[in-house]
Image (spheres, rainbow, N blue to C red):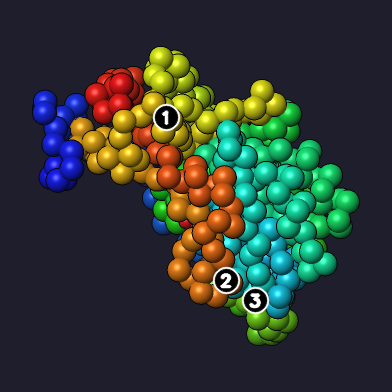
Amino acid sequence: MPPTDCVQPKTPPVRADLLPYGRQAINEDDIAAVVVALRSPMITTGEMVPAFEEAIAETSGAAHGVAVSSGTAALHAAMHALDIGLQDEVIVPTITFAASANAVVYQGGVPIFADVDADTLLLDPSDVERRITPRTKAILAVDYAGQPCDYDALRSIADKHSLTLVADACHAIGGAYKNRPVGSLADLSTFSFHPVKHITTGEGGMVVTDNQPWAERMRRFRNHGITVDYQQRQREGSWFYAIAELGFNYRITDIQCALGLSQLSKLDGWIRRRQAIAQRYHAALADMTSVKQLHCSADVSHAYHLYVVQLETDYCPLSRAEVFAALRNEGIGVNVHYIPVHLHPYYQEQFGCRPGDCPVAENAYERMLSLPMFPAMTDDDVADVIEALNKAVG
Ligand SMILES: *Cc1c(COP(=O)(O)O)cnc(C)c1O
């Protein structure tokens, strides 16, 4: 990467190659599992799909899993299961990947952006309560960076106002809140299996829930709204199918689910490795005044999809853009998660969102950076990140 104008490295970069912020780990077991699936008679809508669904549901303490083609499709299916329709409001934190809000819009609903807690960047329950109106149907909580939200607080607000509680848990599979696994904390929870997430199927996603009618509706939704699936039709020897309502092709293949099952067997070890990397970062940051870590609640097991730090503007001589450029110049693939969704042009134009709507999130956005975090990182990689940070702002 060429040096940018504002920051010229004076010494050789810490790394010659760019250390990415996240990366998948695929081994020979995974490849063998995919080969088996490729040789089987059904490479989509076969037996690997329910096998993967059951395994993820079990891991996450939910009764049902519905696998789909992406985490975004999972969010869309969840909004559909809840019958989110025209003008229905769903409260979404503004610090998230835009897909969380887009899924509400796909259904004709209105995402109402709520602010986050300054120390965790998780949905702030008191701000959620302030934004409830007679049109509010659901709260969509995001387990940002891998830390589960305060689900007891969110649940009591949801119950008080008869709202459904949905978790966008795309960052948090394998995490827990008060010893309850992520996936069992909301009425519906969604996961993503994109390569930067904890386990991957290339592209893929899942919704887990205890609610059987919702699960059935989402199975139909992922297959054009058709009421009988391929296997059911084979069993019945029938040509018949019916479009009960409008759906999509959000199916996932057996090839992907075979990879997902193989990856899932490694999830626990990977979470422990992510937590160990986080401990190393915590220890290094404790000595630095210009950068601070996010607060982690004692009630949770943090899944550390991301390791996010915030610049302390009173002590840090550089802006976030300068620190970002300096770290990239050192070969450290830092990133920013996320631009607050309400600031995107689409949301400003279509929904009248404005700067100032979520002041805590907007301030945090100016100061945030994600450091590299993935289980295959070595201790030397972690040391490189710390060295580069010290060089930039130490
Ligand atoms: C990754 C992600 C999604 C979307 O998942 P895809 O599989 O990429 O569609 C949604 N929400 C959050 C918070 C995510 O991190």
Q: Residues within 10 Å of mark 2 (few under 14, many from 20)?
A: few
Q: Which residue is mark 2?
A: 352
Pick the residue in front: 222 or 298.
298
Q: Which residue is mark 1?
A: 314
Q: Residues within 10 Å of mark 1 (few under 14, many from 20)?
A: few
Mark 2–mark 3 contact, CB under 8 Å? no
Q: Which residue is mark 3?
A: 108
Mark 1–mark 2 contact, CB under 8 Å? no
Mark 3–mark 1 contact, CB under 8 Å? no
Q: Is residue 378 visible?
A: no
Q: Secondary structure at mark 2?
A: loop
- Taking the image as shown, residue 177 lies to the left or right of residue 45, namely right
Q: What residue is rendered at 24% in x and 24% in y?
A: 391
106 shown above or below 49: below
Q: What residue is rendered at 58% in x and 72% in y?
A: 351
How far, Cα to Cα, is label 2 from label 3?
Answer: 16 Å
Question: From the image, which quarter does the N terminus lie in?
Answer: top left
Tell me where residue 108 appears, x and y as whole percent. 65, 76
Residue type highlighted by circle 3: Gly
Residue 328 lies in quadrant: top left
Between label 3 and label 1, give the one nearer the viewer.
1
Q: Is residue 150 visible?
A: yes
Pick the residue in front: 51 or 118.
118
Q: Secondary structure at mark 1?
A: loop
Pick the residue in front: 257 or 183.
183
Pick the residue in front: 238 or 287.
287
Q: What residue is rendered at 49% in x and 61% in y?
A: 343
